[in-house]
């Protein structure tokens, strides 16, 4: 699967839906568009809960093939105070790698001043891929200006 910049988001959302549906989740596209890209419910839970998600995808940088950059709209901060999930799709050749972070993870980073924002108020995250024993490992860097490497297990 080759993904152009224009199609990467649509391809990733379709692949994510296929994967979640095959795992037994119920999915819905919110209408009207309120900024959520996908609603997910695990119908197998005793008390199923709606999970609101924002979907972002990225291709490797043309100048640094091991670097992926994802940015958000200024409404990113408003989602940090509610139960919300951010799902990333990172393309590496013909593979898509998935990463899911709860809003509480990014809220802690924001409170610790570990998120880089551009002049338009967009949060910017860089993922770097390395090879560990033949498997790709992705590291998230929230504020490269401060050289802060973020590991979800430690945040």
Image (spheres, helix red, strand yellow):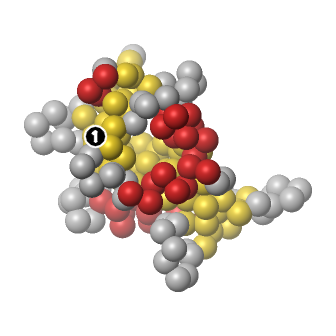
Return the x and y of residue 128 as percentages of the image width and height. 31, 30
| Residue at 18%, 41% in the rendered image | 61
Q: Which secondary structure lies at badge 1?
A: strand
Of residue 56 and residue 13, the one placed in the foreground of this image is 56
- Given residues 151 and 45, the one toward you in this image is 151
Image coordinates for residue 122, horizontal then vertical, percent: 33, 52
**Residue drawn at (34%, 62%) of the image:** 9
What quarter of the picture does the N terminus occupy?
Answer: bottom left
Answer yes or no: is residue 96 visible. no
Question: For mark 1, what is the residue?
Answer: 68
Task: Determine if residue 62 is in view.
Answer: yes
Residue 53, horizontal then vertical, whole percent: 55, 59
In the image, what residue occupies the spot 45% across and 54% down?
A: 76
Q: Residue furthest bottom?
A: 32
Please tell me how many numbered marks the rendered image carries. Answer: 1
Q: Quadrant of residue 47?
A: bottom right
Closer to the camera in the image, 55 or 104: 104
Task: Identify whether 94 is placed above or below 147.
Answer: below
Q: Residue 9 or 78: which is nearer the viewer?
A: 78
Left or right, 50 with reference to 99: right
- Is residue 45 left or right of 115 when viewed as pictured? right
Q: Position of residue 124 (x, y in %)?
A: 33, 44
Q: Residue furthest top?
A: 133
Q: Quadrant of residue 133?
A: top left
Q: Quadrant of residue 55?
A: bottom left
Outermost residue, right side: 46
Q: Is residue 48 left or right of residue 56?
A: right
In screen coordinates, is 84 left or right of 44? left
Residue drawn 55% across and 55% down? 79
Q: Badge 1: how crowded within 10 Å, few (<14), some, or many (20+)?
A: many
State which quarter of the image contains the C terminus.
top right
């Amino acid at each position: 699967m080759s993904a152009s910049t224009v199609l990467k988001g649509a391809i990733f959302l379709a692949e994510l839906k296929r994967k979640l549906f095959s795992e037994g989740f119920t999915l819905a596209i919110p209408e009207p568009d309120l900024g959520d890209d996908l609603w997910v419910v695990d119908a197998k839970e005793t008390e199923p809960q709606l999970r609101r998600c924002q979907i972002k995808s990225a291709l490797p940088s043309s100048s640094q093939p091991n670097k992926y950059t994802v940015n958000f709209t200024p409404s990113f901060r408003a989602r940090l105070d509610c139960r919300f999930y951010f799902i990333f799709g990172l393309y590496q050749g013909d593979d898509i790698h998935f990463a899911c972070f709860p809003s509480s993870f990014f809220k802690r980073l924001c409170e610790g001043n570990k998120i880089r924002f551009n002049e338009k108020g967009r949060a910017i995250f860089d993922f770097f891929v390395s090879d560990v024993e033949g498997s790709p490992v992705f590291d998230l860097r929230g504020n490269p200006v401060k050289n802060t490497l973020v590991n979800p297990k430690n945040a």
